[in-house]
């Protein structure tokens, strides 16, 4: 594998530079003096920002973009060997690294690295960690899978040896990471277009746990079934967190205010340490906060720094994000695209003032929709009304016969009012005519479903 010397900047080309992670990595090395160029299928705010910082952006992806002066190419999982730029790079024999390989090498340059893994909650927990470390003036470098107001985007280049990032299990990409502080939030079935089953996913997380650097700390949530199987063979210290009460870091006196924002007292080994009042809604965020608390406390940060950081955190983009008011209707957007995430989001909504919860769900990938069909139906049925759009294909094509009309019918069979519309315009038209006073509209999905709420608000 090609090894980068980060002390000697080179010219790097990013295939898929407009992605949330790739754009962040490009910005990191751009600020470190590397020459950066890259391509994507369409321009965006992220590509525009990179261009303003000196990156050369090509739209769309074409073979002629790959020139002989490129020293290294970094590519996303969405880039395949039939891509014209990939083929040109192979012909020119230019070294290539996957996004995960590149991120792993980048992380190795920092003495205090933190990786946040798990099926759910990675972005929120990473954002909470970021707020704590910023409050402590630790000057971290941050790479996050969402937009965070505190850093003005999805990346922050710091001046210390501290690096925080999310670690995704898809295609085993997180196995390229060797963090000092390793957090595993949960392990559930997902990415079944790559993994065979939950057992294979658990084996992958076990290997990831084993990548924790000697002298580091492995943080494991108590929600994980048989966590000892994940930590078996690990030669680093293992710290547990959760809300059962018997973990190393736990929470007591959990309560939610009228806007579903939780407060709690956190404990370490059964002893009370501090009181936290979160500014983000959802009881599930207590577990995310405990992960951030455990990590920063074990890294030596004070209770006061932890409390100040958490209480300054008001959420990351597309995580139960308040978008505005459409008349008397509250418009929320959430990135939830897995049944567990949808359930957590809708349970949070039910704790907020509302007449009806109206969900607009855009399924993400055909394989996930097909393989977790029953779980989606069960989670979505928490809504009073569900509106379904077509699947956001992402990296896939439909070879499974997935029909969102059938998903709507399955919900109706459970007694949930459900509709399907093939276009966003039809969804917007239906919604504009069928709101009641004090409804809560939630757009759900990892694709572009958020545009529906934004379009309605632009009309109001």
Image (cartoon, helix red, strand yellow):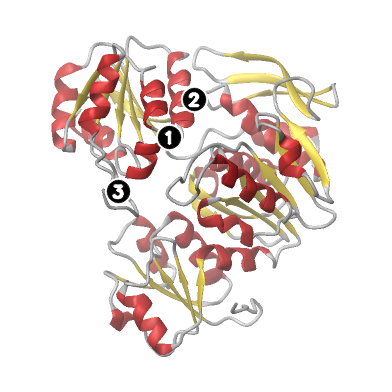
Asked which quadrant contains residue 432, the reply is top left
Residue where numbered disc 3 is placed: 393
Mark 3 or mark 1, which has the lower sequence index?
1
Within 10 Å of disc 3 (Cα), the crowding (few <14, some 14-19, many 20+) is some
Residue where numbered disc 1 is placed: 336
**In the picture, which quadrant includes the C terminus?**
top left
Mark 3 or mark 2, which has the lower sequence index?
2
Please tell me whether mark 3 sits on a helix, a strand or a loop: loop
Q: CA distance from mark 3 to mark 2?
A: 24 Å
Residue 315, visible in the rendered structure: yes
Q: Position of residue 394 (x, y in %)?
A: 33, 51
Q: CA distance from mark 2 to mark 1?
A: 9 Å
Left or right: residue 242 compared with residue 61: right
Q: Is residue 336 above or below residue 264?
A: below
- Asked whether disc 3 touches disc 2, contact meaning CB atoms under 8 Å apart, the reply is no
Please tell me whether mark 2 sits on a helix, a strand or a loop: helix
Please tell me whether mark 1 sits on a helix, a strand or a loop: loop
Q: Position of residue 208 (x, y in %)?
A: 67, 52
- The residue sitting at 71% across, 38% down in the picture is 220
Residue where numbered disc 2 is placed: 344
Q: Position of residue 438 (x, y in %)?
A: 31, 12
- Asked whether disc 2 touches disc 1, contact meaning CB atoms under 8 Å apart, the reply is yes
Q: Could you say which is closer to the camera, residue 273 or residue 379?
A: 379
Within 10 Å of disc 2 (Cα), the crowding (few <14, some 14-19, many 20+) is some
Q: Position of residue 268 (x, y in %)?
A: 83, 28
Q: CA distance from mark 3 to mark 1?
A: 16 Å
Q: Could you say which is closer to the camera, residue 267 or residue 460?
A: 267
- Asked whether disc 3 touches disc 1, contact meaning CB atoms under 8 Å apart, the reply is no
Left or right: residue 365 compared with residue 241: left
Q: Is residue 280 above or below residue 351?
A: below
- The residue sitting at 35% across, 17% down in the picture is 383
């Amino acid at each position: 594998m090609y090894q980068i010397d980060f002390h000697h900047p080179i010219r790097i080309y990013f295939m898929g530079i407009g992605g949330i992670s790739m754009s962040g990595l490009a910005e990191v090395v751009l600020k470190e003096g590397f020459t950066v160029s890259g391509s994507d299928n369409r321009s965006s705010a992220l590509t525009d920002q990179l261009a303003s910082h000196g990156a050369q952006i090509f739209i769309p992806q074409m073979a002629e973009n790959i020139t002989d002066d490129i020293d290294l190419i970094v590519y996303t999982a969405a880039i395949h060997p039939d891509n014209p730029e990939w083929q040109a790079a192979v012909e020119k024999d230019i070294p290539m690294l996957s996004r995960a390989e590149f991120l792993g090498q980048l992380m190795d340059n920092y003495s205090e690295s933190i990786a946040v893994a798990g099926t759910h909650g990675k972005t929120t927990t990473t954002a909470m960690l970021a707020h704590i470390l910023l409050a402590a003036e630790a000057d971290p470098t941050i790479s996050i899978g969402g937009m965070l107001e505190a850093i003005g985007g999805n990346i922050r280049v710091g001046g210390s040896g501290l690096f925080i990032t999310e670690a995704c299990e898809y295609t085993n990409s997180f196995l390229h990471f060797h963090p000092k502080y390793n957090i595993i939030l949960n392990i559930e079935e997902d990415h079944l277009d790559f993994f065979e089953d939950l057992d294979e996913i658990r084996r992958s997380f076990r290997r990831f746990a084993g990548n924790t650097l000697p002298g580091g700390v492995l943080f494991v949530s108590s929600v994980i079934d048989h966590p000892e199987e994940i930590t078996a063979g690990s030669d680093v210290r293992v710290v547990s967190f959760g809300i059962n009460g018997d973990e190393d870091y736990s929470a007591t006196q959990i309560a939610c205010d009228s806007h579903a924002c939780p407060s709690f007292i956190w404990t370490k080994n059964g002893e009370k340490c501090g009181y936290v009042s979160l500014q983000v809604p959802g009881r599930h965020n207590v577990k995310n906060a405990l992960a951030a608390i455990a990590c920063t406390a074990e890294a030596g940060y004070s209770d006061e720094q932890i409390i100040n950081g958490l209480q300054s955190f008001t959420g990351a983009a597309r995580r139960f994000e308040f978008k505005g008011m459409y008349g008397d209707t509250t418009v929320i957007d959430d990135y939830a695209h897995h049944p567990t995430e949808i359930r957590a989001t809708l349970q949070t909504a039910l704790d907020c003032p509302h007449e009806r919860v109206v969900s607009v769900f855009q399924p993400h990938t055909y394989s996930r929709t097909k393989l977790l069909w029953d779980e989606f139906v069960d989670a979505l049925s928490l809504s009073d009304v569900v509106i379904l759009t077509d699947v956001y294909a992402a990296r896939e094509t439909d070879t499974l016969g997935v029909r969102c009309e059938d998903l709507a019918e399955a919900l109706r069979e459970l007694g949930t009012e459900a509709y399907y519309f093939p276009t966003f315009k039809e969804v917007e038209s239906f919604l504009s005519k069928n709101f009641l006073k004090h409804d809560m509209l939630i757009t759900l999905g990892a694709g572009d479903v958020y545009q529906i709420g934004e379009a309605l608000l632009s009309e109001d």
